[in-house]
Amino acid sequence: MTLQSGWAKAGSGMTAVFGTVVNPGAKDVTLLGGSSPAAADVQIHSMVKQPDGSMKMTQKQGGLTVPAGGSAELTPGADHIMLVNLHSALVNGGDVSLVLRTADGANVEWTVPVRSFAGAEETYAPEDHR
């Protein structure tokens, strides 16, 4: 499993990791969550449209499945990896490491650059986290 063009949004409190997860293997792989020295928890999240039309960030039940020989996109406003309760702010130009756990018990390790991004105007704050 690789993360192509991976990056983390600069920020404090909570932030997200984006990129293209590529699975060159012969079996589907499901990412469930993980850990990072930069955060108290690492979770798979998605943005879900609510009945009133608003978008709400929620933890993705069952994780993120990446098809065999395929890929899954992690993008602002859609599926993404959340770094929850950062120990300190992630600043533009730095790096952050994370370990993702798969449904079959394997670990996948990635290090991604941190960059500023205002595109989707998402705000990751504890009150939005459920």
Image (spheres, helix red, strand yellow):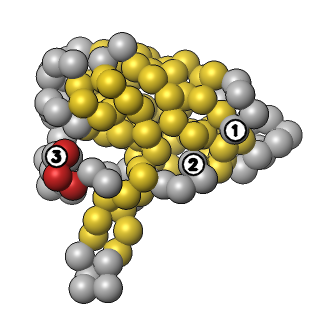
- Residue 36: image location, x then y, percent: 40, 20
**Mark 1 element type:** loop
- Residue 10: image location, x then y, percent: 18, 30
**Mark 2 element type:** loop
- Mark pair 3, 1: CA separation: 28 Å
Q: Is residue 66 among the parts visible in the rendering?
A: yes
> Left or right: where does residue 83 sit relative to residue 128?
right
Q: Is residue 113 among the parts visible in the rendering?
A: no
Circle 2 packing at 10 Å, graded few (<14), some (14-19), many (20+), is: many
Q: Quadrant of the C terminus?
A: bottom left
Residue 42 in which image quadrant: top left
Q: Residue furthest right?
A: 26
Q: Earlier in the sequence, mark 3 or mark 2?
A: 2
> Left or right: where does residue 2 sit relative to residue 125?
right
- Residue 44: image location, x then y, percent: 46, 44
Tag 2: amino acid: Gly
Q: Residue furthest bottom?
A: 52
- Mark pair 1, 2: CA separation: 8 Å
Q: Which residue is mark 2?
A: 63
Q: Are marks 1 and 2 in contact (CB under 8 Å)?
A: yes
**Mark 3 element type:** loop
Q: Which residue is mark 3?
A: 125
Tag 3: amino acid: Ala
Q: Are marks 3 and 2 in contact (CB under 8 Å)?
A: no
Circle 1 packing at 10 Å, graded few (<14), some (14-19), many (20+), is: some
Q: Earlier in the sequence, mark 1 or mark 2?
A: 2
Q: Which residue is mark 1?
A: 103
- Mark pair 3, 2: CA separation: 21 Å
